Image: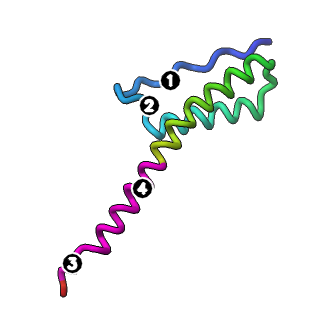
Amino acid sequence: MPTPPPSPPPPHSPRGPSFAEQLERIEEIVRRLETEELDLDEALRLLEDGVERLRPARERLTAAEAKVKQIRIDDLDAPSASG
């Protein structure tokens, strides 16, 4: 029996899916690849979809980490209010 197509992604902002939406879809893809018996074409399609979603999610995570590091540096460099 063929596997039904995945449900369409939820509506998202013009910037694209949020990090959480991307992560949720990647997790869904991994679950399907791990648990379902898929033919080669379907497995490759899912893998390509996962890779396409992983790149921008990784870039957003890296940018967020850099921003947190900068905030921490700025906080350490700020003059103390008590002294």
Question: Mark 3, residues whose alpha carbon is within 10 Å: few (<14), some, or many (≥20)?
Answer: few
Q: Amino acid at mark 2?
A: Pro
Q: Position of residue 64 (x, y in %)?
A: 42, 51
Q: Earlier in the sequence, mark 4 or mark 2?
A: 2
The segment highlighted magenta reads 62-81
Foreground: disc 2 or disc 1:
2
The answer to whether residue 46 is left or right of residue 52 is right
At mark 1, the secondary structure is: loop
The answer to whether residue 9 is left or right of residue 16 is right
Tag of residue 79:
3
Which residue corresponds to mark 4?
66
Foreground: disc 3 or disc 1:
3
At mark 2, the secondary structure is: loop
Residue at 39%, 59% in the rendered image:
68
Which residue corresponds to mark 2?
17
Foreground: disc 2 or disc 3:
3
Q: Amino acid at mark 4?
A: Ala
Q: Is residue 83 above or below residue 43?
A: below
Q: Earlier in the sequence, mark 4 or mark 1?
A: 1
Q: Is residue 43 above or below residue 59?
A: above
Q: Mark 2 and mark 1 in contact? Answer it, CB < 8 Å.
A: yes
Question: Mark 1, residues whose alpha carbon is within 10 Å: few (<14), some, or many (≥20)?
Answer: few
Which residue corresponds to mark 1?
9
Q: Amino acid at mark 1?
A: Pro
